[in-house]
Amino acid sequence: MTVSTTSAAPQQVELTRPLHTVMVGGTVAMITVIALLVTAAWPGPDDALPTAESTPPLVEPDYGPEAQVNPEDSSLEIIEFGFTPMADLAGDTMVSWGAIVMNTSSTMTAVSGVYIEPYDTDGESLAFDTEWDLWVDIKHLMPGETIGLGSTSYIDDGDFDTLEVHIGTIEWYVPEELGNGTLTTTDIDTEWVNVGERKNYWSSDGISFPENERGDLRVTYTVTSTYSTLLDNVSVCVIYRNDDGEIIGSSRPDDVGYTTDYPPGWSIRSVETSYGPPEDLDVDRIEVYALP
């Protein structure tokens, strides 16, 4: 069935003053409605104002798990330590140092740090102005786990004699609260890069551009993570040893850069040393510790 429609012919409407009066009336009506709405929304003298009881409470931020009391007679133990006095390409005094640290607890994860104190032959401190350079974080050391850490740090010019290493304040956590997993490194490879290039250094004598004759050491390694999630803001420590197997120093924590991460499973990463290593390094004895 077909339905047909017919449009009526358009009619001309003469605009007269009554139409103008109707439009004004509509405007007045609209203003009246808005006024009623505003009056209804604005609290009057008899309306109850919000009280403290009716105000939603503030939500406390979540700062993560709290430190626990370690039920065991355990601590962090420095089982090996070594250092080498050296200088950067501009001649400023540095010391490269490394330590092997073990968590002797069998049930608790440790969070702490290691710091050094350099001394001259008179027993006076040679701590540099940037004291953060003398401290390395231990962010996550699992029960029974052993890691290597250290740095290559600037110290005040002086007659350097010895270096002491200390464990900072320790906080203990249930392992599951900080993440329960391991990081292992294999397939370590080394090469010298940037050989002969000039580096810009800033010192008290101004800016210099010494030649990097030996170059920088690049260490490539495979890291296997048993953590279930991606680990970012991670670090790595390359422990340096000499021909006798003694620790003579390590890389700096920031050598790995700020974009390195460790995904679940295995991945290939590299680190390039910014200072050193000491001259008597045996590259075949290098150890790499991936740190969460």
Image: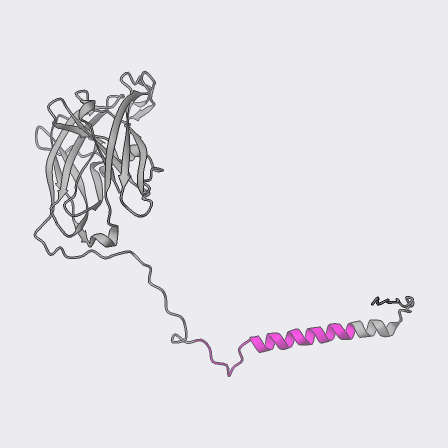
- Along the line of sight, which residue is nearer the eye, 227 or 172? 227
Q: Residue furthest bottom?
A: 46
**x, y percent for residue 250:** 20, 30
Question: In the image, 18: left or right of 80?
Answer: right
- Along the line of sight, which residue is nearer the eye, 157 or 144? 144
Query: Quadrant of residue 129 in the image?
Result: top left
Q: Quadrant of the C terminus?
A: top left
Query: Up-down: is 251 above or below 74?
Result: above
Residue at position x 72%, y 76% from top? Answer: 29
Q: Which residues are magenta?
A: 24-50
* Magenta-span inclusion, residue 32: yes
- The answer to whether residue 156 of the structure is visible from this angle is no
Residue at position x 14%, y 45% from top? Answer: 144
Q: Quadrant of the N terminus?
A: bottom right
- Along the line of sight, which residue is nearer the eye, 68 or 224? 224
Count of numbered labels shown in the rendering: 0
**x, y percent for residue 58:** 36, 66
**x, y percent for residue 22:** 81, 74
**x, y percent for residue 6:** 88, 67
- The answer to whether residue 3 of the structure is visible from this angle is yes
Query: Quadrant of residue 18 in the image?
Result: bottom right
Secondary structure predominantly adopted by residues drawn in magenta: helix
Query: Up-down: is 145 above or below 285?
Result: below
- Along the line of sight, which residue is nearer the eye, 59 or 144? 144
